[in-house]
Image (cartoon, grey):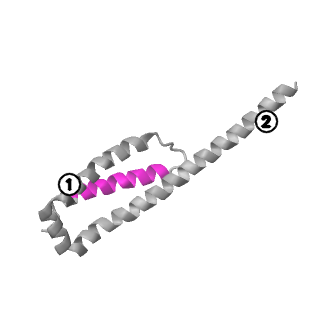
Amino acid sequence: MSVFDNIRPIVKELDSLTNRIIDNLSDSKEGLEDLDELYNKRTVFIKQIDEFIDNDKNKQLILKYESDWKSMMEPLRVKDENALRLLKSKVNSMEEELKQREKQKNVLLYKESEK
């Protein structure tokens, strides 16, 4: 039995949600529609972890078993960074697509005005 067994299911669920976010962002055909719901669910679990950390008894446990805590939380940090990179890339791609559409629209409007 680990000292962090009571928080591990929350971390596992958070990991699962982060994986779903990464999968969603990695799919070039997916938009950003489902992400809002996933991030809202994720926020609930992050708040639960924050509450766990805020408890003085748990803070002492985290300090005492710091390496166990880090080994549980570090993969989440790495996945979060990956998800953020993917989100930025997706947004940049969408912005670029909008710029291209705007250019095409302007060309069509210009051609129409010449007629």
Along the viewing direction, whichever of 17 and 96 lies nearer the viewer: 96
Query: According to the image, label 2 marks what residue?
Result: 107
Residue occupying the far right of the picture:
115
Extreme residue toward the top, this view = 115
List the residue tagged with mark 1.
51
Residue at the (31%, 45%) spot, across then down: 41
Q: Name which residue lies at 26% across and 58% down.
A: 11
| Dominant secondary structure, magenta | helix
Percent position of residue 108, x then y: 78, 32
- At label 2, counting other C-alpha atoms closer than 10 Å, the crowd grade (few under 14, some 14-19, many 20 or more) is few
At x 46%, y 39%, the residue is: 33
19 left or right of 64 in image: right
Amino acid under disc 1: Glu
- Where residue 3 appears, as percent x and y from the top left, is 14, 68
Give the spatial CA distance, label 1 vs label 2: 55 Å
Residue bounds of the magenta highlight: 9-26
Please count the marks in the image: 2
Q: Is residue 46 above or below residue 64?
A: above
- Of the residues shown, which amino acid type is indicated by label 2? Val
In the figure, residue 70 lies in which quadrant?
bottom left
Q: Residues within 10 Å of mark 1 (few under 14, many from 20)?
A: few
Q: Secondary structure at mark 2?
A: helix
Identify which residue is drawn at 54% across, 45% down.
29
